[in-house]
Image (cartoon, grey):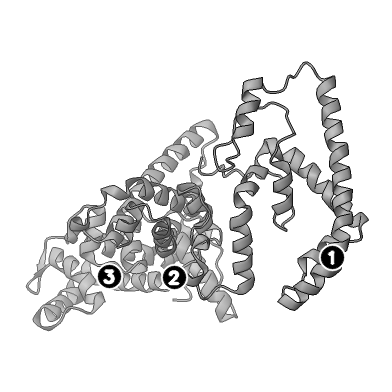
């Protein structure tokens, strides 16, 4: 097993772990944090944390993928708290700019109507959905990311978030519904 | 209304079953009750429609491509080493081309010396030495671009060897001449700067014995360009332009 080889000092095994999981972790971070730059920093932090705590991974307690995702999620929580704190500090330092949060998504995203090119449309749609996702509360956002983007099952998600499966399902429902409502405002004509 | 029972099903139960319905894993009697509740409940009906729509939006999101240097950066940040794969024996990697293997092989030969050459205290003398060599080579009529496109077939190498060996003697004489001048300049400098003494005698002795280039760089910043290691570094430096910048990965430190 990769982890065991890695703990035995096999550097190739560690590189295999990095190769195997970097894409997944980067995507979770990107969809949660919103920007590619943050996602890159966060992904690196995840691997640094993994590298340092690899010996604490217990095979008996669950799949390696769940462990990796838990580390990622915990760092995302820290990141969210920190950036929220930064935002509070920023707004105290500078003139308040509440309109940014208060303005509905439909006003922040220019209405595209019906773009002629299907490819351009799908790319722009992806961008719009991504931005709408950032508007969800972190609890709902992480739930739908793990379920609909990472295809994790409810039991695994419950293990990562450390909440009952029922709570996971409820958050997924609310996250999906909230996202649909946000996008309905943007795509009222198209839908 | 949460907690309200419609068609034999509570809203909480509807909520619990909703994701399973969208996964299409629910069937039979339970599914019928679920649908009946959704048709009449003013809360759960819209929730079903919106959740379905939101799921559709999320599923439309494509996986994004991580930056190309991400793996490299992670490996540097964690192990301090770029990649270990390249140091495996060539037999374990049949997919690697001959040129790549040559480069790796050259890399393993020069990497310890090259590592020394990259350290700031060697950078200056190395840069000067490279400059001298390229000057000497160009004086002797060899362009560096020619060196990069050398034909490596055995017959070609043999022919090139004989063609070149004669000239090499001449380069050597030229290089030696340049070194001669360099070392004179160094001696002159040392003699004229008594304010900055060289290493203490015992220190100098220690360094002479210490030919181990893989160890940690010494942190002392004495201005001493003359190191025994300069010439071997020069002789085995890889073809890449010897840009003597010190790479720092500020992000992770
Ligand atoms: Zn209901």
Mark 2 vs 1, N-terminal side: 2
Report how far apart the C-alphas of labels 2 and 3 lie in the structure. Answer: 23 Å
- The image's mark for residue B61 is 2
Left or right? Give the position of A5 relative to B128. left
In this picture, is B9 found above or below B24? Answer: above
Asked which secondary structure carries label 2, the reply is loop
Circle 3 or circle 1, nearest the eye: 1
* Mark 3, other Cα within 10 Å: few <14 / some 14–19 / many ≥20: some
Q: Residue at x 39, y 69 (%)?
A: B58
Left or right? Give the position of B71 relative to B135. left
> To which residue does mark 1 refer?
B164
Q: Is mark 3 within 8 Å of ligand 1?
A: no
* Mark 1, other Cα within 10 Å: few <14 / some 14–19 / many ≥20: few
Q: Provide residue A60's location: percent of width, then percent of height.
A: 18, 57
Circles 2 and 3 on the same subunit: yes
Please tell me in which quadrant of the rendered image residue B109 appears.
bottom right
* Chain containing mark 2: B
> To which residue does mark 3 refer?
B46
Please tell me in which quadrant of the rendered image residue B198 appears.
top right
Count of labels in the image: 3
Q: Can residue B146 be seen in this view?
A: yes
Asked which secondary structure carries label 3, the reply is helix
Q: Provide residue B132's location: percent of width, then percent of height.
A: 84, 46
Circle 2 or circle 1, nearest the eye: 1
- The residue most toward the top is B195
């Amino acid at each position: 097993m990769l982890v065991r080889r890695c703990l035995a000092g096999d550097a190739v095994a560690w590189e295999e772990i990095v190769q195997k999981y970097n894409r997944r972790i980067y995507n979770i971070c990107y969809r949660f944090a919103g920007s590619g730059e943050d996602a890159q920093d966060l992904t690196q932090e995840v691997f640094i944390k993994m590298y340092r705590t690899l010996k604490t991974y217990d095979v008996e307690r669950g799949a390696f993928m769940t462990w990796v995702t838990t580390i990622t999620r915990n760092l995302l929580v820290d990141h969210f708290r920190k950036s929220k704190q930064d935002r509070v500090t920023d707004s105290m330092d500078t003139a308040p700019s509440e309109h940014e949060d208060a303005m509905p998504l439909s006003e922040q995203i220019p209405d595209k109507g019906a773009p002629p090119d299907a490819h351009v449309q799908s790319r722009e749609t992806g961008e719009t959905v991504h931005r709408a996702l950032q508007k969800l509360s972190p609890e709902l956002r992480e739930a739908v990311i793990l379920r609909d983007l990472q295809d994790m099952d409810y039991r695994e998600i419950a293990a990562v978030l450390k909440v009952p499966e029922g709570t996971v399902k409820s958050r997924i429902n609310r996250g999906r519904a909230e996202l649909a409502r946000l996008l309905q405002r943007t795509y009222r004509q198209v839908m | 209304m949460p907690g309200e029972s419609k068609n034999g099903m509570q809203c909480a139960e509807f909520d619990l079953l909703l994701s399973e319905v969208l996964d299409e894993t629910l069937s039979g009697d339970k599914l019928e009750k679920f649908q009946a509740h959704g048709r009449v409940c003013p809360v759960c009906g819209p929730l079903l429609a919106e959740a379905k729509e939101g799921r559709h939006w999320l599923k439309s999101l494509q996986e994004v491509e991580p930056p190309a240097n991400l793996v490299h950066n992670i490996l540097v940040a964690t192990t301090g080493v770029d990649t270990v794969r390249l140091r495996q024996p060539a037999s374990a990697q049949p997919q690697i081309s001959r040129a790549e293997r040559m480069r790796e092989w050259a890399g393993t030969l020069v990497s310890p010396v090259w590592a020394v050459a990259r350290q700031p205290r060697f950078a200056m003398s190395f840069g000067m030495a490279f400059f001298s060599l390229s000057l000497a080579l160009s004086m002797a009529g060899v362009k560096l671009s020619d060196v990069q496109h050398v034909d490596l077939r055995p017959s070609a190498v043999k022919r090139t060897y004989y063609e070149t060996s004669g000239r090499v003697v001449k380069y050597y004489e030229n290089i030696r001449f340049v070194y001669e001048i360099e070392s004179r300049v160094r001696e002159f400098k040392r003699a004229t700067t008594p304010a900055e003494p060289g290493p203490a005698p015992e220190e100098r002795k220690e360094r002479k014995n210490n030919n181990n280039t893989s160890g940690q760089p010494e942190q002392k910043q004495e201005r001493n360009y003359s190191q025994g290691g300069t010439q071997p570094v020069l002789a085995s430096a890889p073809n890449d332009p010897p840009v003597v910048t010190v790479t720092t990965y500020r992000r992770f430190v």
